[in-house]
Image (spheres, rainbow, N blue to C red):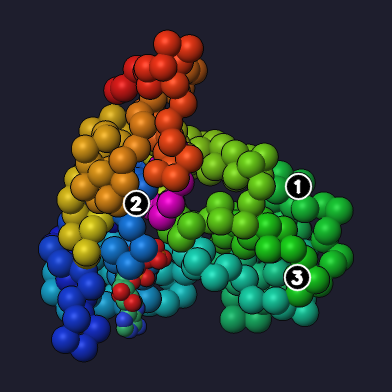
Amino acid sequence: MLAARKVGKHYGERSVLSEVSLNVGPGEMVGIIGPNGSGKTTLLRLLSGEERPDTGTVMWEDRPIADWPVRERARRIALLPQEGLPPLDFTVEEVVMMGRHPHQGWWPWITERDRALVEEILADTDLLSHRWRPVAVLSGGERQRVAIAQAMAQQPRLLLLDEPTTYLDVRHQLSMLDRIVRWKRKDGLSVVIVLHDLNLAAQFCDRLLLLKNGRVIREGTPEQVIQASVIRDAYGIDPVMVRHPSAGVPQVLLQSEEKGFVTTSCGQPLSVSAP
Ligand SMILES: Nc1ncnc2c1ncn2[C@@H]1O[C@H](COP(=O)(O)OP(=O)(O)OP(=O)(O)O)[C@@H](O)[C@H]1O
């Protein structure tokens, strides 16, 4: 459905993305991980059609993404940028309703169906009590929930998310990602998500793409990517690997160089089962 073939991007003389290929099918959730500045946001912008690659192509439904008329693209693809929503004076309900614009005519009549859908989304995203508040007065996390609610109202087929959990507390991180999983199961939504949290990436993504210096250094299932040697190579840290006791996926524990290691009563380093 979405296919990037050997895409590359330069800014001036500087190459920030080289030869990156990626396929995302219906109902699939692909995570993009990698250190700061490795090209994750640039890749997402190329996938959304907001920017054109200098080399390679991005195809959506067998047609170059840049050839889709903007309105048609907006009916199919939603991008949640890293900076989230600006502090708008519009109310939460109005901003969520704006997600319906690509589906409305040139004059944005709001139909009963639009109203019912927005009502359902406000309830689902825990925003009913905020509906009359201007977005400008919301906290960062509340604003992030409005951004995802707006994307849901857009009813896209492809959802591109750039670090959507950044401002969210742990409950809302989980509920946002669970909501996306339910949504993709129900509607066959394709999802590409940039995440810094490797543990959430391992739990929620079907496949991961690990970038370093603009190149893919590992791609595969969380099992294939979230490995101590790979994480060490990508991030230059020495992680402790454990397996999630109920989800069964690899998880990364960070260890401080300054605080030392936890030892057992016999003075040995605490051993954990590494995946
Ligand atoms: N418009 C631009 N002009 C010049 N350089 C840019 C531009 N956009 C991005 N870059 C550079 O490209 C590189 C990759 O940036 P990008 O935002 O894609 O990284 P990232 O992996 O998303 O980083 P982070 O994890 O910090 O968000 C960075 O070095 C950045 O400075």
User: Which residue matches tag 3?
Assistant: 135
Instruction: Specify the farthest residue to the bottom.
Output: 12
Q: CA distance from mark 1 to mark 2?
A: 28 Å
Disc 2/disc 3 C-alpha distance (Å): 29 Å
Residue 163 image label: none
Picture quarter containing residue 68?
Answer: bottom left
Relative to residue 196, is residue 184 depicted above or below?
above
The residue that appears at 48% across and 12% down in the rendered structure is 265
Amino acid type indicated by mark 1: Asp
**Residue 122 drawn at (x, y percent):** 74, 52
Between 255 and 258, the residue placed more toward the observer is 258
Quarter of image, ligand 1: bottom left
Could you say which quadrant of the image residue 37 lies in? bottom left
> In the image, is residue 47 part of the stretch drawn in magenta?
no
Q: Is residue 207 above or below residue 275?
A: below
**Residue closest to the eye, 232 or 165:** 232
Q: Which residue is mark 2?
A: 33
- Whole-number angstrom distance, CA of label 3 to CA of label 1: 15 Å
Answer yes or no: disc 1 within 8 Å of ligand 1.
Answer: no
**Can you give x and y, in whole percent of width and height, for residue 11 in the image?**
24, 83
Q: Give the total number of marks visible in the rendering.
A: 3
**Type of residue at label 2?**
Ile
- Identify the element where label 2 is drawn: strand
Q: CB under 8 Å between callouts 1 and 2?
A: no
Q: What residue would you read off at disc 1?
A: 126
| Element type at mark 1 | loop
**Of 130 and 57, the residue lying toward us:** 130
Q: Position of residue 63 (x, y in %)?
A: 23, 65
